[in-house]
Amino acid sequence: MICGVVTFVVLLLLGMPYAAPLALLVAVLDLIPLVGATLGGALLAIPVAEIIRILVTEILAYRRSRQEGSGPAAQSSAPPTTSE
């Protein structure tokens, strides 16, 4: 029961669709010794792994765009002007 409630709260916080049915499935599967807990860890691990992948992709894209934005600006210089 505790695993189902914790799963529901985590999935709700992550904004996952169908949080209640997934949490209910985890709670029921957790009643099966050994296999149930593993299947319930798998149902929670898939969304968590996807969130980690998205975060890493976004961070790398942000760093890449930041480096590209500062690179050409620092290398290019204004042409010298002549004053008469």
Image: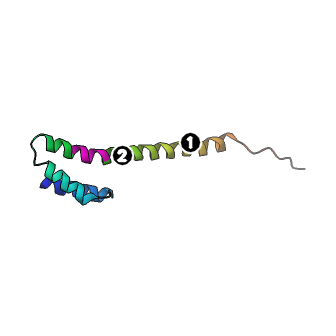
Q: Position of residue 57 (x, y in %)?
A: 45, 44
Measure the alpha-carbon separation of dots 2 and 1.
Answer: 26 Å
Query: Which contiguous range is marked in magenta?
Result: 41-46
Q: Amino acid at mark 2?
A: Glu
**What's under tag 1, amino acid-wise?**
Gln
Considering only vertical position in the picture, is 48 above or below 11?
above
Horizontally, is 78 left or right of 21 in the view?
A: right
- Please give the name of the residue rendered at 27% of the width and 55% of the height, measured from the top-left corner: 11
Residue tagged by mark 1?
67
Q: Is residue 57 highlighted in magenta?
A: no
Quadrant in which the N terminus appears: bottom left
Q: Which mark is residue 14?
A: none
Could you say where residue 38 lies in the image, as x and y percent from the top left? Answer: 18, 41
Q: Residue at image x 60%, y 46%?
A: 69
Q: Quadrant of residue 56?
A: top left
Is residue 66 toward the left or the right of residue 45 in the image? Answer: right
State the residue at coordinates (50%, 47%).
62
| Residue 62 horizontal side relative to residue 19, left or right | right
Residue 14 image-quadrant placement = bottom left
Please name the residue that numbered disc 2 is placed on.
50
Q: Can you give x and y, in whole percent of width and height, for residue 84 in the image?
A: 90, 50
